[in-house]
């Protein structure tokens, strides 16, 4: 259900009529209310028929002022019970709706001395409880000082009339989008005044019937008032346009320089973070650069063809022939760009060969195809049998799988990607990495090597494994509480709460603090270990991982939350110190996984632990470290 309400200030000027036509074409309203039409019924009937409305009601203007019109489509059953120079009051029954709703389209009184009486009379429009009621139109009244912008006197009494009407009739405002001020005096500079005179009100019964209703304040065109567009199901937000790399860009001048400038930037963080940051820079630079390109290749092709036709009808001297070659080369370049564009953006077809263009058609077709292709097959697998299988991966196989990934392997895998097969969320398909491998290959190889070389995040491993165990039991109709699954879940949960060693040649530092509020003292502990879970003093650390059980601190350092002002100077110092490492990341862990640093911080607070050590930690701490190692 869509309703348009507009003080058009005369439906005679062509601009006003064109704006109304555009609104009806854009929103396809079911009901339109116009005030200050300033036109007689025959002309308004002509506009109604042209705009495709089946029925109409009118209150003619007095002289060259006023005038109301109400149009609706045949699908609605509209009955007007009260009609005068200020309002249309009646009921509307929609298709497939059990009860009609009450409407009051109002053109508020403009005479200052008569407004109070007008709003008192409007209170009689209220019907019995339980009937949805919508009040909409140019109410010519304000509710607060926030409804006004600009200079000029205004009395508080002007607020009370509308406010008392809303309180007595138990009405409230419907949320809106757009410019809050729906009227302007169209003057410039300090003399400009803007008010919110047009609004929509509804009672609780109407809100329950249309809980997602919303009002849109359209542009002021052809009138000093904004048209109000009411949609009972809210206005769908336009989908966010995702970035997608376009092949035709590679044929434009300045493309290579744009990619190099976007990629060759200094970014601090892990190798994966660096690649994502450089892709983000390339994406921003490409979007900015692409806006400067000429966007009408068909027009250029037509112009070049006409120019070439003219040149080929002239005397074929040397200058003429050279000019023809230049035009033909430009035509060839434009055709190549067009081919690249349509090759990349070729449409999806269904089984009948019909093009699928809308998002709904494409999503429905893809869902049905994949549902059929990957539908579950019946299985008779037994959980006891699965757990009785002996391991088949030998230590030699495992060692060959765990060797470092080479640059040649990453390159070979990259060039096996389909050029335009399903780009990821960053919008860069395989052709981007293939065309710029010399530039991006080294960083991509480092990111992949770091990902496979480091220990997998235990939280991710545990969550996925527990999900798969539950899913296996659900599909096979097994009880998820059988002993093998319980044993697996207990082991995984225990794994989640344990310390994990860092990758090779990387140092992991667990940090924690303890505070004695009574005595006003505090201690900070740092426990550093390498991949062999032993520690030898050395200088020049380059790769380091920090872990802490303070989630707020870790999120602030990783820029995942707004930086609290209390720790802002400390976090800024941390960011600056991170630049001295080639690899540095900060992770949150639970208290049990940070038990070593927690123990040291508490003991140092009581002077029960040495201030520092390298190879001979305290006995109790040594037991904690040994527990992590043995696990």
Image (cartoon, helix red, strand yellow):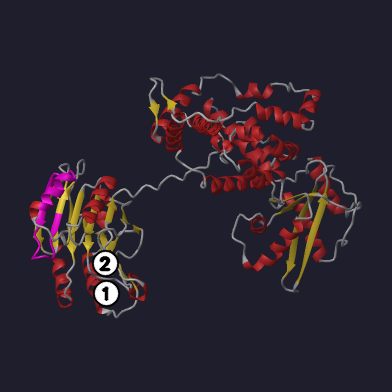
The vertical placement of 538 against 143, above or below, is: above
The kind of secondary structure element at disc 1 is helix
Image quadrant in which you'd find residue 490: top right
Viewer-proximal residue, 219 or 298?
298
Residue at 29%, 71% (x, y): give it: 143
What percent of the width, then of the height, locates residue 595?
Answer: 76, 52
Image quadrant in which you'd find residue 302: top left
Viewer-proximal residue, 404 or 624?
404
Viewer-proximal residue, 183 or 449?
183
- Alpha carbon distance from label 1 to label 2: 11 Å
Dot 1 surroundings within 10 Å: few (below 14), some, or many (20 or more)?
some
Q: Magenta stretch: give its range.
A: 43-69
Q: In the rendered image, which residue does mark 2 sit on?
A: 197
Residue at 53%, 42% (x, y): give it: 243
The vertical placement of 193 against 460, above or below, is: below
What percent of the width, then of the height, locates residue 368?
Answer: 43, 26
Image quadrant in which you'd find residue 522: bottom right
Q: Is residue 475 magenta?
A: no
Residue at 21%, 65% (x, y): give it: 169
Viewer-proximal residue, 385 or 83?
83
Q: Which image quarter is the C terminus in?
A: top right
- Earlier along the polypeptide chain: callout 1 or callout 2? 1
Q: In the rendered image, which residue does mark 1 sit on?
A: 159
Q: How many marks?
A: 2
């Amino acid at each position: 259900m869509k309703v348009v309400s507009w003080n058009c200030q005369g439906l005679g000027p062509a601009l006003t009529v064109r704006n109304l036509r555009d609104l009806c074409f854009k929103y396809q309203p079911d009901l339109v209310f116009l005030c200050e039409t300033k036109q007689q019924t025959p002309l308004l009937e002509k506009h109604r028929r042209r705009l495709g409305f089946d029925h109409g009601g009118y209150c003619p203007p007095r002289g060259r002022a006023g005038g109301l019109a109400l149009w609706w489509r045949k699908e609605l059953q509209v009955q007007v019970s009260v009609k005068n120079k200020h309002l249309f009051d009646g009921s509307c029954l929609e298709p497939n709706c059990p009860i009609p709703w009450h409407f009051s389209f109002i053109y508020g009184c403009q005479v200052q001395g008569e407004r109070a009486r007008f709003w008192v009379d409007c209170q009689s429009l209220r019907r019995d409880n339980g009937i949805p009621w919508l009040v909409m139109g140019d109410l010519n009244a304000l509710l607060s000082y926030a409804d006004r912008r600009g200079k000029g006197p205004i009395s508080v009494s002007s607020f009370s009339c509308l406010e008392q009407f809303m309180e007595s009739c138990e009405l409230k405002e419907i949320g809106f989008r757009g410019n809050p001020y729906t009227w302007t005096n169209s003057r410039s500079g300090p003399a400009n005044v803007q008010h919110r005179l047009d609004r929509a009100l509804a009672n609780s019964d109407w809100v329950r019937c249309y809980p997602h209703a919303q009002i849109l304040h359209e542009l002021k065109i052809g009138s000093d008032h904004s048209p109000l567009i009411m949609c009972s199901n809210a206005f769908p937000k336009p989908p966010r346009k995702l970035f997608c790399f376009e092949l035709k860009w590679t044929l434009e001048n300045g493309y290579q320089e744009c990619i190099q400038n976007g990629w060759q930037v200094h970014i601090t963080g892990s190798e994966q973070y660096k690649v994502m940051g450089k892709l983000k820079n390339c994406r921003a630079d490409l979007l900015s650069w692409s806006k400067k390109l000429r966007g009408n290749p068909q027009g250029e092709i037509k112009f070049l063809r006409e120019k070439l036709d003219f040149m080929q009808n002239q005397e074929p001297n040397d200058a003429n022939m050279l000019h023809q070659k230049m035009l033909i080369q430009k035509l060839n370049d434009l055709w190549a760009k067009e081919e690249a564009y349509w090759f990349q953006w070729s449409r999806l077809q269904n089984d009948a060969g019909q093009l699928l263009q809308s998002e709904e058609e494409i999503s429905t077709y893809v869902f049905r195809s994949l549902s059929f292709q990957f539908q579950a097959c019946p299985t008779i697998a037994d959980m006891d049998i699965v757990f009785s299988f002996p391991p088949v991966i030998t230590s030699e196989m495992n060692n060959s799988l765990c060797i470092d990934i080479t640059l040649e392997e990453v390159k070979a895998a990259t060039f096996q990607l389909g050029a335009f097969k399903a780009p990821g969320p960053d919008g860069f398909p395989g052709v981007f990495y293939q065309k710029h491998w010399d530039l991006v290959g080294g960083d991509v190889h480092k990111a992949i090597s770091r990902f496979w070389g480091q220990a997998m995040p235990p939280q991710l491993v545990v969550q996925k494994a527990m999900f798969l165990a539950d899913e296996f039991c659900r599909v096979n109709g097994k009880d998820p509480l059988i002993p093998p699954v319980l044993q697996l879940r207990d082991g995984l949960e225990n794994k989640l709460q344990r310390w994990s060693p860092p990758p090779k040649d990387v140092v992991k530092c667990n940090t924690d603090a303890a505070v004695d509020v009574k005595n006003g003292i505090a201690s900070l502990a740092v426990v550093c270990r390498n991949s062999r879970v032993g520690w030898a003093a050395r200088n020049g650390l380059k790769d380091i991982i920090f872990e802490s059980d303070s989630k707020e601190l870790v999120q602030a350092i990783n820029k995942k939350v707004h930086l609290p002002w209390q720790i802002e100077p400390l976090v800024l110092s941390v960011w600056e110190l991170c630049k001295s490492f080639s690899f540095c990341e900060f992770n949150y862990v639970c208290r049990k996984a940070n038990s070593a640093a927690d123990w040291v911080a508490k003991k140092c607070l009581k002077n029960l632990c040495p201030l520092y050590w390298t190879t001979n930690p305290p006995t109790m701490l040594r037991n904690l470290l040994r527990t992590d190692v043995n696990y």
